[in-house]
């Protein structure tokens, strides 16, 4: 990235326009040019005040994230801000688009801030593993109070201009032309208005502690969240300059750390996932109304995604009772969201009104897109696709939410296979960010572009996969789960495997997840596949035995664990089953340490990824990282399994792969992990 600052004059007001497409990030070039422009303002006797504005679509969306992994070149942002404050003339920041992180801090260092109604402000630093580093933790509490500052800095939440005004973070919202409004505001300023350097009154310490513990909980106790709280609190206890210096030191330490590197990797991975070769010049089809077939948990969740995005949706099921239940589920979820303050009370009705219900597929006759979320059975899906093909407009897109069935077979049942695509949502669909977009053998570029565009509008992280059992996520997860079951036969117990992987950072270990989702679905699938399974393959039958005993997971009060009533408790009866299984195979049980458990589980993911890349089901390693982090509870601060692998010792990983092959025995497929590691090293 490069960047310049254009200086224009409006009488005695200088307008400094930061121009660094696409988002005016404050790169070294921008900082250099801005510092010079600020000095020129100071030196020019004809200028009385200045406005800093962003060229094109946005103010400054933040510091240039690409610079964060390296030593920062001078001048750094605090130097630029100090120059603005040292200048005898007042500066007004004019905000539109995004004023985030370093961009927002730059504006906070000015004497006043005005914004257009579309502007958003905020501190995304914690989501990148850092804290604000150019005064954010000191200015925000001085303007909005300690409690509000903790909330906004620790969550990274973006505030719209009206809220920012209400909280005192900006001085005015400009109705007409922002540049003109800002120039007029600057003319009206009577000298410098530098933010008070006095300490912030500590305020209500009980409220502060409450906000701090809520922020820590929501931020999963990550170190940058704790550091942000401490920095904000220091606004009440330390002299301004000392607090500023401490903030900077913490920022510098965190930005060079491994967690920040992992989160930056995910930031760029997300942007890259949306780029698919061949779609550059393809215009997506406009989707203004959608249909969802199946009003169960998944279908209702998907319908909410559309309603949340302002898209009219028709939810279909076979009878009034089923659609009624679906709609009630939707209303109930919105009401709970309103009660906890996640949406406004008015939004409940507005969003529910976007969901129409019907019991006849014919009601989808005018839809641009239909997503089926029916029972996972190929015959059911094929029959449904035939009907949808007959009913929906010829140019509409037909999508399946299947999590493992072959999309191409569904497409073949229609007269428009090129307009069939997979949209694999994750449960709960309205919450989970991941969307696997499955590109069938016949899916056209426009259909794929439409699916990606819908994904963006639904605010999902869309990752493209090709057709293959389980696509990306479920395929890797199945291999991982199988490996975890091998570990039970080899000597571990479910709670040991879960504890090791939760210790690594997974939201939940594999056995706790299985109990939560229910063991019966996988059991049905295993029974179906039993006839075609090669008897030489290593097969762990413990889960089958649990199911035969009616232990189907949480819903039956027992599975891999016992539940008391919601707390999971290791169960000696399960231990006995596991020991029996080991004995039947003549396996001498041994203790598996945390390191071995994690290495085997993670290496299984890496091996499976190598296979997925070779088969062309996943396009790039970073796509797999996104899938695992956003759909399967992989800790984001490790950056995903491939980012993790890149940081491990190569020889150790390759040796681990050999051990996996030996422990799995017949049928183990070895991916080209060495080639994958080379690719990761090349990508840097
Ligand atoms: N530094 C470097 N590059 C950045 C950037 C930043 N702070 N913010 C965005 N970009 C780049 C993206 O990587 C992308 O590059 P690409 O086109 O080469 O892939 C491009 O700008 C556009 O970003 P994108 O997110 O695709 O555009 P958008 O219009 O959907 O969203 C923003 C724009 C600004 C809202 C969004 O990019 C954003 O939230 N950026 C992060 C801001 C941030 O965290 N700033 C604080 C840093 S401490």
Image (cartoon, rainbow, N blue to C red):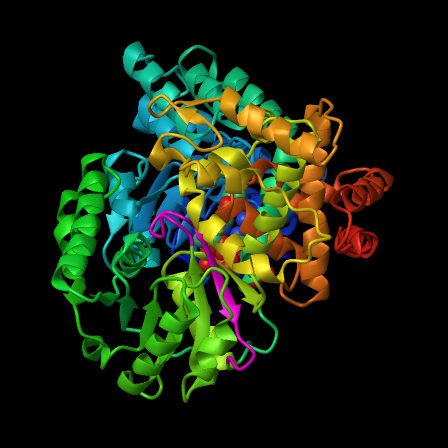
Please identify the dominant SS of the magenta region: loop
Q: Is residue 169 left or right of residue 234?
A: left
Measured as percent of width and height from the top left, residue 21 is found at 54, 61
Which quarter of the figure has residue 368? bottom left
Q: Residue furthest right?
A: 651
Is residue 85 or residue 282 the one in the foreground?
A: 282
Question: In terms of depth relative to the viewer, which is nearer, 295 or 425?
Answer: 295
Tell me if residue 360 is in the magenta stretch: no
User: Is 626 situated left or right of 594 in this image?
Assistant: left
Q: Quadrant of the N terminus?
A: bottom right
Can residue 497 be seen in the rendering of this structure? no
Classify residue 557 as left or right of residue 72: left
Between 591 and 263, the one nearer to me in the picture = 591
Residue 441: in magenta span: yes
The percent position of residue 285, horizontal first and vertical second, equals: 38, 79
Image spot of residue 309 (x, y percent) = 29, 59
Q: Using the image as rendered, state which of residue 154 and residue 25 is in the foreground.
A: 154
Measuring 47% from the left and 18% from the top, which residue is drawn there?
Answer: 230
Relative to residue 139, is residue 623 depicted above or below? below
Q: Is residue 565 visible?
A: yes
Q: Is residue 211 left or right of residue 283?
A: left
Q: Which residues are magenta?
A: 426-443
Residue found 44% across the figure and 63% down from its top: 402
Identify the image quadrant of residue 548.
top left
Q: How many marks?
A: 0
Where is residue 202, by image quadrant?
Answer: top left
Q: Residue 145 appears at what percent x and percent y? A: 31, 23
């Amino acid at each position: 990235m490069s960047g310049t600052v254009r200086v224009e004059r409006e009488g005695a007001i200088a307008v400094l326009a930061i121009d660094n497409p696409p988002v005016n990030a404050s790169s070294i070039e921008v900082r250099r040019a801005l510092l010079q422009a600020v000095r020129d303002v100071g030196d020019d006797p004809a200028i009385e005040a200045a406005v800093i504005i962003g060229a094109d679509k946005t103010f400054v969306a933040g510091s240039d994230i690409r610079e964060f992994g390296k030593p920062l070149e001078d001048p750094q942002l605090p130097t630029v801000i100090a120059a603005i404050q040292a200048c005898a003339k007042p500066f007004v920041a004019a905000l539109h688009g995004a004023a985030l992180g370093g961009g927002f801090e730059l504006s906070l260092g000015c004497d006043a801030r005005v914004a257009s109604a579309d502007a958003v402000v905020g501190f995304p630093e914690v989501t990148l593993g850092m804290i604000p580093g150019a005064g954010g933790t000191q200015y925000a509490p001085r303007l909005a109070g300690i409690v509000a500052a903790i909330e906004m800095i620790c969550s990274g939440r973006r505030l719209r201009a009206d809220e920012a005004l209400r909280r005192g973070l900006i001085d005015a919202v400009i109705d007409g032309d922002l540049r003109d409004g800002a120039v007029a505001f600057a003319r009206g300023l009577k000298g410098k208005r530098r933010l008070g350097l006095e300490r912030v009154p500590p305020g209500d310490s009980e409220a502060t502690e409450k906000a701090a513990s809520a922020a820590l909980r929501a931020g999963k106790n990550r170190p940058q969240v704790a550091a942000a709280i401490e920095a904000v609190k220091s606004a009440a206890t330390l002299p301004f300059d000392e607090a500023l210096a401490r903030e900077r030191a913490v920022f510098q330490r965190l930005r060079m750390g491994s967690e920040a590197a992992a989160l930056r990797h995910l930031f760029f991975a997300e942007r890259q996932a949306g780029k698919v070769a061949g779609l550059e010049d393809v215009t997506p089809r406009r989707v203004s109304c959608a249909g969802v077939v199946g009003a169960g948990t998944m279908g209702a969740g998907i319908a909410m995604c559309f309603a949340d995005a302002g898209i009219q949706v028709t939810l279909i099921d076979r009878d009034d009772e089923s659609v009624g239940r679906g709609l009630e589920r939707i209303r109930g979820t919105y009401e709970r969201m309103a009660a906890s303050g996640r949406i406004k009370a008015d939004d409940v009705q507005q969003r529910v009104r976007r969901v129409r219900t019907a019991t006849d597929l014919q009601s989808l006759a005018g839809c641009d897109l239909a997503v089926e979320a029916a029972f996972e059975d190929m015959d059911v899906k094929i029959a449904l696709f035939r009907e949808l093909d007959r009913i929906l407009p010829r140019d509409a897109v037909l999508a399946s939410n299947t999590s493992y069935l072959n999309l191409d077979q569904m497409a073949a049942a229609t007269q428009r296979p090129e307009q069939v695509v997979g949209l694999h949502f994750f449960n709960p669909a309205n919450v989970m960010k991941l969307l696997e977009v499955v590109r069938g053998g016949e899916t056209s570029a426009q259909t794929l572009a439409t699916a990606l565009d819908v994904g963006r509008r639904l605010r999902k992280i869309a990752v493209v996969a090709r057709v293959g059992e389980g696509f990306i996520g479920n395929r890797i997860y199945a291999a991982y789960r199988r490996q975890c079951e091998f570990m039970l036969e080899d000597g571990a117990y479910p709670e040991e495997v879960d504890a090791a992987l939760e210790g690594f950072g997974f939201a939940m270990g594999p056995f706790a997840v299985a109990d939560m989702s229910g063991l019966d679905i996988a059991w049905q699938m295993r029974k179906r596949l039993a006839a075609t399974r090669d008897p030489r393959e290593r097969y762990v039958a413990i889960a089958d035995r649990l199911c035969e005993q009616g232990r189907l997971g949480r819903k039956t009060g027992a599975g891999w664990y016992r539940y008391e009533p919601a707390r999971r408790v290791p169960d000696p009866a399960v231990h006995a089953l596991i020991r029996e299984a080991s004995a039947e195979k003549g396996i001498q049980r041994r203790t598996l340490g945390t390191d071995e458990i994690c290495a085997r589980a993670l290496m299984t993911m890496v091996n499976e990824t190598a296979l997925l890349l070779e088969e062309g089901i996943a396009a790039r390693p970073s796509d797999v990282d996104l899938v695992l982090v956003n759909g399967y509870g992989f800790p984001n601060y490790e950056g995903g399994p491939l980012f993790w692998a890149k940081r491990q010792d190569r020889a150790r990983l390759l040796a681990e792969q050999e051990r996996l092959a030996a422990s799995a025995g017949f049928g183990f497929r070895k991916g080209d992990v060495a080639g994958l590691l080379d690719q990761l090293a090349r990508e840097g």
